[in-house]
């Protein structure tokens, strides 16, 4: 059971370049989310999805796009990378359909540096 | 907007000590609360999930309690070991009658624990 898989693990981008961080889960989870983690700021929600075809913005969505064409995949796109987007990115997923008891699972993270 | 505070920010203890990590949150309208562990350069590993109907949850040497009305949760680690050294994060699951919990978490900045041999 692979759980939540993120690729790439490390990436260096030049300012203005675009790229996509991939996230896939094999647990048939409906909920998927992207967070970024920065020193002194903790983890902050970028975008989330409650099911295929449904996405919504989190706390810090600017500069990022998401789509959810399948239950398994939730890619995060950086449209035009900026140094402020240097961060560690985490993808997370969980079940829906229950009002309690939904453990959230995280990927191993993607370290992104924008120069 | 939910705000989560974790105290202390850092803690260094000798091996074998029992210790308590604190988490407070401003919005008590939550479903559950989850404690995570993060090792340097790694992702988050779920330790305990306390459901809204529970007041505490135990797993091995870990015990977490939840008091929703006062906006507090504590993580108790018994007989600490060097392998417990990590950053511990708490995250309340938001309450939303239109969707089940789990998609939008607010995290504290964590408590960085060092257990010295």
Image (cartoon, coloured by chain):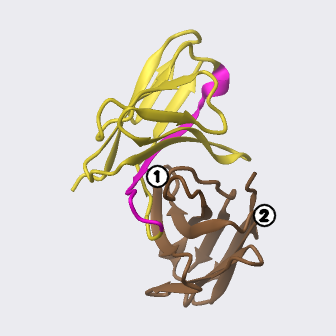
Chain colours: A yellow, B brown
Q: Specify the subunit that label 1 lies on.
A: B
In the rendered image, the vertical position of residue B6 relative to residue B103, given as above or below: below
Query: In percent of the image, x 67 and y 82: which residue is there?
Result: B20
In the rendered image, the vertical position of residue B110 relative to residue A23, given as above or below: below
Q: Residue B107, percent across and down?
A: 64, 56
In the image: residue B113, left or right of residue B44: right
Dot 1 and dot 2 within a common chain: yes
Name which quarter of the figure residue B87 lies in. Answer: bottom right
Q: Residue A73, percent across and down?
A: 32, 36
Q: Residue furthest front?
A: B98
The stretch in magenta equals A83-99
The disc, 1 or 2, on the residue closer to the chain's N-terminal end is: 2
Query: In percent of the image, x 43 and y 64: which residue is there?
Result: A103
Question: Is residue A92 on the magenta stretch?
Answer: yes
Say which of A104 and B31 sits in front.
B31
Disc 2 secondary structure class: loop
Name which quarter of the figure residue B22 lies in. Answer: bottom right
Q: Residue A34, percent across and down?
A: 50, 40
Q: Are marks 1 and 2 in contact (CB under 8 Å)?
A: no
In the rendered image, the vertical position of residue B72 relative to residue A108, given as above or below: below
Disc 1 secondary structure class: loop
In the image: residue A20, left or right of residue B95: left
Label 2, residues with CA under 10 Å away: few <14, some 14-19, many ≥20: some
Q: Which mark is residue B26?
A: 2
Query: In percent of the image, x 64 and y 24: which residue is there?
Result: A62
Q: Which mark is residue B42?
A: 1
Q: Specify the subunit that label 2 lies on.
A: B
Name which quarter of the figure residue B18 lies in. Answer: bottom right
Q: Which mark is residue B32?
A: none
């Amino acid at each position: 059971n692979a759980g939540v898989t993120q690729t790439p693990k490390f990436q260096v981008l030049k300012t203005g370049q675009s790229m996509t961080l991939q996230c896939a889960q094999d647990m048939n989870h409906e909920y998927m989310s992207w967070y970024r983690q920065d020193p002194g700021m903790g983890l902050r929600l970028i975008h989330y999805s409650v099911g295929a075809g449904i996405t919504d913005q989190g706390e810090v969505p600017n500069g990022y796009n998401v789509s959810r064409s399948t239950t398994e995949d939730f890619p995060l796109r950086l449209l035009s990378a900026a140094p402020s987007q240097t961060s560690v990115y985490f993808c997370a997923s969980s079940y829906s359909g229950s009002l309690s008891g939904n453990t959230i699972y995280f990927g191993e993270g993607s370290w992104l540096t924008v120069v | 907007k939910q705000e989560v505070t974790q105290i202390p920010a850092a803690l260094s203890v000798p091996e074998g000590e029992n210790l308590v990590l604190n988490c407070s949150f401003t919005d008590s309208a939550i479903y559950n609360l989850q404690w995570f562990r993060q090792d340097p350069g790694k992702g988050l590993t779920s330790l305990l999930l306390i459901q809204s109907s529970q007041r505490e949850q135990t797993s091995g040497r870990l015990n977490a309690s939840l008091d929703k009305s006062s906006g507090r949760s504590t993580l108790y680690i018994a007989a600490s070991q060097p392998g417990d050294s990590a950053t511990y994060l708490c995250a309340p699951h938001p309450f939303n009658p239109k969707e089940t919990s789990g998609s939008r978490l607010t995290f504290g900045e964590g408590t960085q624990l060092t257990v010295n041999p």
